Amino acid sequence: MSAPLLEVRDVTRRFGGLVANSHVSMEVRQGEILGLIGPNGAGKSTLFNLIAGAFPPSAGQILLEGRDITTLPGTARCGLGIARTFQVPRSFDSMTVLENVMVGAFVRHPRAHAAQAAALETLDYVGLAARAGAPAGELTPPEKRRLEMARALATRPRLLLLDEVMTGLTPSEAQKGVELVRRVREAGVTIVMVEHVMEVVMPLVDRAVVLHLGEVLAEGSPQQVVRDDGVITAYLGERHRAA
Amino acid sequence: MTTQALLQVLASGLLMGLLYALIAVGLSLIFGLMDVVNFAHGDFLMVAMYAAFGLWFFTGLDPLLAAPLVTGLLFVLGALAYLGVVRFAMRARSNAGMVQIFATFGLAITIQGLAQFLFTPDYRSIGQSWLGERTINLGGLFLPLPQVYGGVVSVLTFAALYLLMSRTDFGKALEATREDQGAVALVGIDRNRVFALGWGLGAALVGLAGAVLAIFYYVHPQVGGPFSTIAYVVVALGGFGSIFGALVAGVIVGLIEALATTILPPALKSIGIYSLYLAVVFLRPRGLFGRL
Amino acid sequence: MAIAKALPLATVPSPFLARRRRQLLLAVPVFALLALLPLLVRDVYLQNVLVLTLMYAALSQSWNILGGYCGQISLGHALYFGIGAYTTSVLFVNFGILPWGGMLAGGVLAVLVALLLGYPCFKLRGHYFSIATIVIAEIGLLLVHNWDYVGAAMGIQWPFGPDSWATLQFARDKVPYFHLALGLFAITWLVTWVIEGSRWGFWWRAVKDDTEAAQSLGVEVFRSKMAAAAVSAFFTAVGGAFYAAFVSYIDPESVMSFRFSLLFALPAVLGGIGTLWGPAVGAAVLIPLTEITRSYLGGNGSGLDLVIYGVLIMLVALARPEGLLSLLPRPRAAGEGGR
């Protein structure tokens, strides 16, 4: 096994008196799809934001291919190849769909012509090319999620962080989403996804890390995790035992 | 400077600061309630001063007695400003910040124009009143009575405001509305009504300040300008939305202004206040007591 | 990477760049027609109004670069206007340096000041930022007011001289000022157009729409704001230099009062902030209206002109928050505010 793409070492994050992540250690391997799961309030979003660089950890280290990126802001992490989506899609509403994606493309293509070409390709890739000229504010919620994906992909990431991209989608939309995520991984992008919808995530991910009360409760293949006693009592509990 | 002179300076700074706090607290209240900066706040002050002046000029009513009337009048003006202008500005779905700035700024210009139309641009002042030119001797400090009156009114008003916010249903409705505008609708609080009353209260407070100020300050259509700048500084210094912050910041501004007057030429005294304000917000962007 | 191979480049349509070409093609005849306007308008008073309209169009476009595109609502641009006006006047009156040089020097000085102030100010958000800009401009006004070298409250009177393009003095004929103001507006328009199509333009709009999302996409937020402030301050100061030459007498109140800060923002708000033509459309409506009401109603100091002006501002803000340009059907300008 090669060195991990991303390593989280003993990370703690406090908000005032509240400890959202406590001594979390985990790694993301090159080329995998990693699921970050856990019940509400488990600290998934905090960990996700720490990796994305939205805010720094109170203690601990985050390494990208062995390089310490703990204190790097989000902008610099994007340059190093980490891209993210937001739980509630945050499109740039004064721009068209194409222009939204061009913002991401400018990271790799300083000139507008090249950025536009890259953005159009990315839009085509996520199946949003037909909406290129539409104002971003007019997209439907599932389209907005695709736009978030396209914008993030346009930065040409090595590591893509997806924050609940399947939430709120109909089963058929979710299926398309799953296919898109698989295709992105096949293109060589490593993926970390925070997700609530277990039925969608479990078949998709290679490994899962389960957080509970801000700590890592279990990690392993989906099959292992689902059978883990701690996980079953803490989170999967009623639903999965009943099934 | 002798100790005596320094105490004299600090005392008058304190009194002026209390009045600044009273001028500013309505602005802070409205901001805390609904995130709107009222750019007509200084002009509300001007209206109050004209009202006090007008009552004295036409009926001979002493500004001391006129204060409740002026306060009530400003309450109505504030509520009307919300219902007639600000309510619509809040509906804007794009450029909301700009719309609020320019809606209230347009209101400010309109009020100034009306004042000029009704009273001409001339400077007016209340020629005589009970408190007028009198001073009081407090342990060797000579303080003008109108300013002392202003300080006392301000302290009492802040005390009343504290009780209002913490003890009454209206205060709780205000507090609940500023915490969570969506949720209050669910518990049957009419948001529009609370906002209108909030604007009324905010304007009434600056109205009371205007009734005091008119005793010893001249009135003209542009008089609100410098006071509104001071009010912004006080509110941002104390923290947008914080009533206690407005009180503390008002006093700080008054003291700094008084001290600056002893060092800087009078024309530059405002620079002292402004610089202090900038120093504070640059070091602590949310002000002394503001929430983020 | 596989994503790059999804489509052959030849079939890629070019909606964004094509629209930009159309914008430029439309602008050329507009500016050409505007240049001919003095042939139709012979009345000196009306020519004066036209000069002011174009000047405010240029100044509002400059404000728009920071306020409209980058979303940083400055209410202190009178500071840069004053820097331009005073630098030009001092250099010309005291040192005999032609206003053209003063224009440039004022612009550069304004850029330096903007960068110096931007460093602390851009940490502030929302109302805190706007009020800090008001306060800083007030400090500038007070300093100039008490600075004897620049004439303090008395201001600076330009010497009378022959009409000349070198000194930008035209006592009888307003038409040269018209073309100068038009040139200024055309340059600010062109600069905005160029920026709109560049990475800076995209970064600025991303910062305005959602700073956090912009950061996650590699946008350098602080640098974006600083760059926008620098460009905006430069052209505001150039506008100030023009104004000083145009009126040939300046004092602190007549170039640095808060009123000017608002006058730079208003046309953009009226026409549509963050758009190419918004400031010009806004200025074309607002400036003639205020000038004409002022000369018909304001002369006697009755205040009625202020009432009309104030009501107008309120109506504009409330009735059409997206600006007048949003009344036009799509296709929309690239920077146009969405809903």
Image: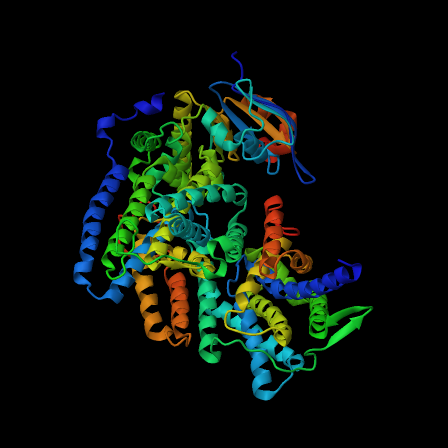
Q: Is residue C227 above or below residue B148?
A: above
Coordinates of residue C80 in the picture (x, y in percent): 44, 50
Q: Is C254 left, or right, of A242 in this rendering? A: left
Q: Is residue A144 above or below residue A202?
A: below
Foreground residue, A160 or C9?
Answer: C9
Color encoding of the figure: rainbow
Determine the residue positioned at 52% across, 41% down.
C119
Q: Is C25 left, or right, of C313 in this rendering? A: left
Which quadrant of the structure image shows residue A22? Answer: top right
Q: Outermost residue, right direction?
A: B139
Quadrant holding the N terminus of chain B: bottom right
Determine the residue positioned at 46% across, 70% down.
B84
Which quadrant of the structure image shows residue C279? Answer: bottom left
Foreground residue, A179 or C89?
Answer: C89
Using the rendered image of the protein, determine whether residue A46 is visible from the camera's viewpoint. Answer: yes
Q: Outermost residue, bottom direction?
A: B59
Coordinates of residue B191 in the picture (x, y in percent): 54, 63
Coordinates of residue A29 in the picture (x, y in percent): 52, 19
Q: Is A95 left, or right, of B148 in this rendering? A: left
Coordinates of residue A200 in the picture (x, y in percent): 47, 31
Determine the residue positioned at 19% across, 50% down.
C32
Q: Number of callouts in the render?
A: 0
Foreground residue, B119 or C42?
Answer: C42
Using the rendered image of the protein, determine whether residue B179 is visible from the camera's viewpoint. Answer: no
